């Protein structure tokens, strides 16, 4: 069992939990995810790690209520436990393995949308701890939906907060702020965009025009997170990839977002899943080889 040491509601329907998971905390890196399951009745929920404390042996997760299992998870309090808490899974962010001196010369821009602010935080924190201060744009629908602002402020070089309705910070979507920063003379070698699929699609369309290489995290299309269900199948540069096994981070300019978002809709029903399995054959699963 994995005990919850802290449980907080960050915003409407968005929860933060700090969970005791010593082995994961020791081994994880920014960009990786865990799978949590409350009990035998609960679904497995893949969640990108929001923070980790190697000394305390804890992992912090942030999730939004989107269905019955996340609703049940949200009812847990400090002192309660998860039955399963598995990880670290997926590949770490690419920059973690880069030569630090090369990395220090790069100008990095992080674009975080809504709940996607949680997986951006450990990346910006890691860079800050290694002497690199990146620019960060955080976008939320409205002031009340903004999360982790203080935490991000403490680790970002420059933090630009924007709300769609202009109720706090700058006004407009994250793409508006990217344009304004570039028009004001800012130059970036790389952009990392994490948030809803539609946001990542439009950030990538813009950064392609601006010629800024862009990494995205495809956690939103995962279902079981184990490479077996076939939910997170995505075309990247014309090749079949699985977000949970090959990612979750990919070159955003190579991701076929329209296909991924359409597939996400089809996958929601049993009929849709049967259709995809028939259409995709042995490439439907993430390599389990048991499609028959
Ligand atoms: P949201 O709908 O409030 O959007 C967040 C921000 O994204 C907006 O404020 C806006 O600035 C930007 N945005 C949205 N649509 C845009 C568009 N068409 N063009 C440009 N910018 C746009 O976000 P939310 O409700 O917090 O999102 C929840 C989603 O985030 C879920 O689908 C969840 O799966 C996803 N999510 C993704 C990750 C990840 O790893 N990519 C992690 C956690 C959550
Ligand atoms: Fe099921 Fe990736 S989430 S195969």
Image (cartoon, rainbow, N blue to C red):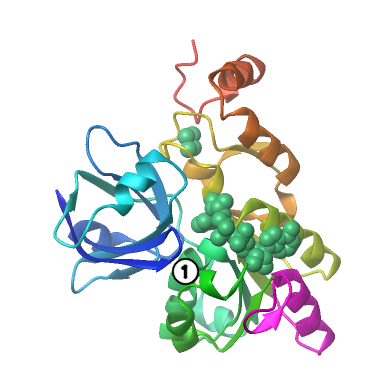
Residue located at (43% from left, 76% from top): 126
Q: Left or right of 145: which side holds 264?
A: right
Asked if residue 218 can be seen in this view, the reply is no
Q: Residue 53 occupies which quadrant of the picture?
A: bottom left
- Give the residue at mark 1: 96
Q: Residue 59 occupies which quadrant of the picture?
A: bottom left
List x then y, in percent, for residue 273: 57, 22
Residue located at (80% from left, 77% from top): 179
Is residue 26 positioned above or below 131 on the image?
above
The residue closer to the viewer here, 230 or 151, is 151
List x then y, in percent, for residue 139: 62, 71
List x then y, in percent, for residue 32: 42, 57
List x then y, in percent, for residue 96: 47, 69
10 Å neighbourhood of mark 1: few (<14), some, or many (≥20)?
A: some
Q: Left or right of 119: which side holds 84?
A: left
Q: Left or right of 109: which side holds 145?
A: left
The residue closer to the viewer here, 114 or 154, is 114
Residue located at (28% from left, 47% from top): 86
């Amino acid at each position: 069992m994995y005990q919850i040491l802290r449980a907080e509601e960050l915003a409407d329907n968005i929860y933060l939990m700090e969970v005791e998971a010593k082995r994961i905390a020791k081994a994880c890196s920014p960009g990786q995810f865990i799978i949590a399951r409350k009990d035998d009745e609960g679904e497995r929920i893949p969640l990108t790690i929001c923070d980790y404390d190697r000394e305390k042996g804890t992992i912090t997760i942030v999730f939004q209520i989107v269905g019955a299992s996340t609703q049940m998870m949200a009812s847990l309090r400090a002192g309660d436990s998860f039955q399963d808490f598995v990880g670290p899974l997926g590949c770490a962010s690419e920059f973690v393995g880069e030569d630090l001196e090369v990395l220090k010369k790069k100008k990095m821009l992080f674009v975080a949308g809504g709940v996607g602010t949680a997986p951006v935080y450990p990346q910006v924190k890691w860079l800050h701890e290694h002497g690199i201060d990146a620019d960060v744009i955080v976008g939320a629908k409205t002031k009340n939906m903004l999360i982790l602002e203080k935490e991000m402020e403490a680790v970002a070089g420059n933090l630009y907060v924007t709300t769609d309705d202009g109720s706090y910070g700058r006004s407009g979507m994250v793409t508006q702020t990217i344009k304004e920063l570039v028009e004001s003379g800012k130059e970036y070698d790389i952009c990392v965009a994490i948030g809803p699929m539609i946001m990542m699609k439009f950030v990538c369309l813009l950064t392609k025009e601006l010629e800024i290489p862009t990494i995205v995290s495809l956690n939103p299309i995962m279902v079981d997170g184990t490479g077996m269900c076939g939910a997170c199948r995505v075309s990247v540069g014309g090749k079949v990839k699985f977000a949970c096994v090959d990612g979750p981070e990919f070159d955003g300019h190579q991701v076929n977002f329209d296909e991924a978002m359409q597939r996400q809709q089809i996958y929601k029903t049993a009929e849709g899943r049967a259709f995809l399995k028939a259409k995709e054959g042995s490439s439907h699963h993430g390599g389990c080889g048991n499609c028959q």
